[in-house]
Image: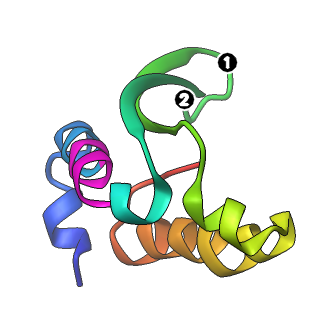
């Protein structure tokens, strides 16, 4: 449903997603900054820079005390949501 939002302007959508995440999710993740992430293009050969969010020290991970809990209840579901529902590739 949200793909209609992200697909027409994918670069702008990645930029806005990074900024909104960095501003609105600090209560859960702690201090965040927007940075640039190097990714492979579809041809698998060249790279490009896209906006990303760097989490300095994740509060959720620190409180859970277990990387598997972090990965399976936060990171992977969030990535799946953005890829499948929003049409935005995130890592």
Check if residue 1 falls in the magenta segment: no
- In the rendering, at what x and y percent does residue 79 appear? 55, 65
The number of numbered badges drawn on the structure is 2
Q: Secondary structure at mark 1?
A: loop
User: Magenta residues, as a range?
Assistant: 18-25
Quadrant containing the N terminus is bottom left
Residue drawn at (67%, 28%) of the image: 44
The residue at which mark 2 appears reads as: 41
- In the rendering, at what x and y percent does residue 30 appear? 45, 51
Q: Quadrant of residue 18?
A: top left
For mark 2, does the 10 Å Cα neighbourhood hold few (<14), some (14 to 19), or many (20 or more) residues? few
Can you tell which mark lies on residue 45?
Answer: 1
Using the image as rendered, state which of residue 18 and residue 70 is in the foreground. 70
Residue drawn at (84%, 69%) of the image: 66
Q: Main secondary structure of the magenta part?
A: helix
Above or below 71: residue 12: above
Residues tagged 2 and 1 counted as in contact (Cβ below 8 A): yes
- In the rendering, at what x and y percent does residue 3 appear? 26, 71
- Compared across the picture, whether 1 is left or right of 66 comes to left
Q: Quadrant of residue 7?
A: bottom left
Above or below 20: residue 38: above
Distance of label 2 from label 1 (alpha carbons): 7 Å
Above or below 76: residue 59: above
Can you tell which mark lies on residue 80?
Answer: none
Q: Secondary structure at mark 2?
A: loop
Using the image as rendered, state which of residue 38 and residue 67 is in the foreground. 67
Q: Quadrant of residue 42?
A: top right
- Compared across the picture, whether 14 is left or right of 4 comes to right
Residue drawn at (78%, 77%) of the image: 69
Using the image as rendered, state which of residue 34 and residue 38 is in the foreground. 34
- Compared across the picture, whether 81 is left or right of 46 comes to left
Residue drawn at (24%, 59%) of the image: 24
């Amino acid at each position: 449903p949200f793909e209609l939002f992200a697909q027409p302007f994918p670069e702008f959508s990645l930029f806005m997603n990074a900024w909104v995440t960095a501003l609105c999710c600090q209560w859960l993740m702690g201090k965040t900054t927007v940075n640039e992430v190097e990714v492979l293009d579809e041809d698998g050969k060249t790279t490009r820079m896209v906006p990303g969010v760097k989490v300095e020290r994740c509060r959720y991970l620190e409180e859970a005390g277990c990387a598997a809990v972090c990965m399976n209840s936060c990171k992977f579901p969030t990535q799946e949501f953005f890829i499948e529902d929003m049409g935005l590739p995130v890592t």
